[in-house]
Amino acid sequence: MSEASAPTHTVLTPRRLSGEAQAGDNRLPEIAEKIKAEYRGVFDAAKVVISKAIAFGELLIAEKAKFRHGDWLDWLETNCDLEKRTAQRYMKLAQNKGTIEGHLRTQQVELESLSFNKAMALIANGSSKNKNKYAKASDSYDTTEDKLVEKLKTMKLETAKASVANTNKRLKATLADMETVAAAQN
């Protein structure tokens, strides 16, 4: 914004003040400082959101190890008022901390300048330099899928049904996360 188009500030006169604030009130500078400090706080908080989100994800991952397989997310949702998908996103962010930091180093950008949605998009899409990586990932997925089907064939029917239900749930949550990230990019 140029100086010529900068907004002008209205000087408060007694008739523009209402309530307890009156012209000459020695609390007005204090009120102004309080407002400015809180406004700066909003920007300061934004600068640390990704660092805090990664630290939170790391905490979730560390605590998850104390639970039996499949119990963690239900326990979180019941006891911590934290939705499963939300917890999964924070853990995914922490698991991909190196990817995020590496991208930021190559772009010469500070972690503090990255929003949560941009970090999630970075994880979901990777960098443009790694397009070949996705072709390999597709091949790897097919191999993993084949192994999963073979493993399923060795299970008892009820165990296989439970495993399929759990895997479907996780796949759907992953797709929902990908859709959220894609929508945030548009």
Image (spheres, helix red, strand yellow):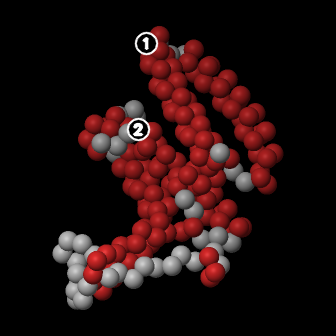
| Disc 1 residue type (three-letter) | Glu
As drawn, 68 above or below 11: above
* Residue 64 locus on image (x, y percent): 38, 45
Lateral position of residue 112 relative to residue 74, left or right: right
Identified at 73% across, 54% down, the residue is 127
Identified at 22% across, 86% down, the residue is 25
Lateral position of residue 59 relative to residue 138, left or right: left
* Residue 144 locus on image (x, y percent): 66, 30
| Disc 2 residue type (three-letter) | Lys
Q: Which mark is residue 19?
A: none
Crowding at mark 2 (Cα within 10 Å: few <14, some 14-19, many 20+): some
Local SS, label 1: helix
- Classify residue 129 by image quadrant: bottom right
As drawn, 105 above or below 145: below
Q: Mark 2 = which residue?
A: 84
Of circles 1 and 2, which is in front?
A: 2
Q: Mark 1 = which residue?
A: 158
